[in-house]
Image (cartoon, coloured by chain):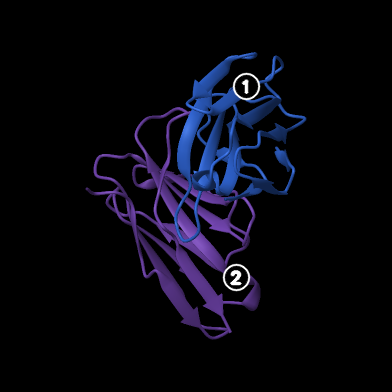
């Protein structure tokens, strides 16, 4: 069963380093989302792709964060010059359809720890 | 900025008890969803409500969308340990696909 997969599941890095987080959405899903979640809190929207283009990147906290989806399938979230405050679980979700009420299917997340 | 406040933030109850979780906002949403999330996993959709005043039932769970489409509630009857998890409401405005998640309610059901 091909759900949303995310790699790595855990990433520990040092402050100032560069990291890449990968998301493989469900095949055929045109919409892809990235969220950031702190412990016990709701996911915080980062960016949304419709196909290859970023339809809304208003949630990216600053220019250290960047995401791509070059072929409209796999997406990579890139974080430059990581800071301790970037530590969180990064969730990816995909959906089929163009409505805000479309069901989002989430991956298990990547737990990022910045030391 | 659309904010969704959930209450209570934490809830610890005995098996068999009933509970209600609230999701409130000052903004109007065209649809509202409820998700449940277990540790180490992503949220899983429970229900979507789209009409003001709508009530949906899913076994022991009852979901209601407020008449003004600004708030929602989730009622669980006879809670079971398997209901334990983080409950999240999420709202979407218009046809725009960005979804705003609520602050979350962590539920623990003690056997």
Please tell me which residue is depicted at 41% across the width and 67% down the height of the picture: A21
| Residue B66, position as x, y percentages in the image | 69, 19
Q: Which residue is mark 1?
A: B64
Residue toward you, A85 or B76: B76
> Closer to the observer: label 2 or label 1?
1
Q: Are marks 2 and 1 in contact (CB under 8 Å)?
A: no
Look at the image and tell me whether residue A56 can be seen: no
Does A62 appear above or below B54?
below
Residue toward you, B10 or A84: B10
Residue lying at the far left in this picture: please name it: A1
In the image, taking residue A113 as reference, residue B70 lies left or right, namely right
Look at the image and tell me whether residue A111 can be seen: yes
Please tell me which residue is depicted at 54% across the width and 32% down the height of the picture: B33
Dot 2 falls on a residue whose secondary structure is helix
Structural distance between the alpha carbons of marks 2 and 1: 36 Å
Q: Which chain is blue?
A: B
Dot 1 falls on a residue whose secondary structure is strand
Residue toward you, A70 or B28: B28
Please tell me which residue is depicted at 41% across the width and 29% down the height of the picture: A98
Which shade is chain A?
A: purple
| Residue B5, position as x, y percentages in the image | 73, 40
Does B29 appear above or below B54?
below
Does A33 appear above or below A30?
below
Q: Is the same chain shared between marks 2 and 1?
A: no
Q: Which residue is mark 2?
A: A86
Please tell me which residue is depicted at 50% across the width and 34% down the height of the picture: B97
Which quadrant holds the N terminus of chain B?
top right
| Residue A15, position as x, y percentages in the image | 58, 84
**Which chain does the residue under circle 1 lie in?**
B
**Which chain does the residue under circle 2 lie in?**
A
């Amino acid at each position: 069963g091909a759900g949303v997969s995310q790699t790595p599941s855990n990433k520990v890095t040092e402050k100032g380093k560069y990291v890449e987080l990968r998301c493989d959405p469900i095949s055929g899903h045109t919409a892809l989302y990235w969220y950031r979640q702190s412990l016990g809190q709701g996911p915080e929207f980062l960016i949304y792709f419709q196909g290859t283009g970023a339809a809304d990147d208003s949630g990216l906290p600053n220019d250290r964060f960047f995401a791509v989806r070059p072929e409209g399938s796999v997406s990579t979230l890139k974080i430059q010059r990581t800071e301790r405050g970037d530590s969180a679980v990064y969730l990816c979700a995909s959906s089929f359809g163009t409505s805000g009420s479309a069901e989002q299917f989430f991956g298990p997340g990547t737990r990022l720890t910045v030391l | 900025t659309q904010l969704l406040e959930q209450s209570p933030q934490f809830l610890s109850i005995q098996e068999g008890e009933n509970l209600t979780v609230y999701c409130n906002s000052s903004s109007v949403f065209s649809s509202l969803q409820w998700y449940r999330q277990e540790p180490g996993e992503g949220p899983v959709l429970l229900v979507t409500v789209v009409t003001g005043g709508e009530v949906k039932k899913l076994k022991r769970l009852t979901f209601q969308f407020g008449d003004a489409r600004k708030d929602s509630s989730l009622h669980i009857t006879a809670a079971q340990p398997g209901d334990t998890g983080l409950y999240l409401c999420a709202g979407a405005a218009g046809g725009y696909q960005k979804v705003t998640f609520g602050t979350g309610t962590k539920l623990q059901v003690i056997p």
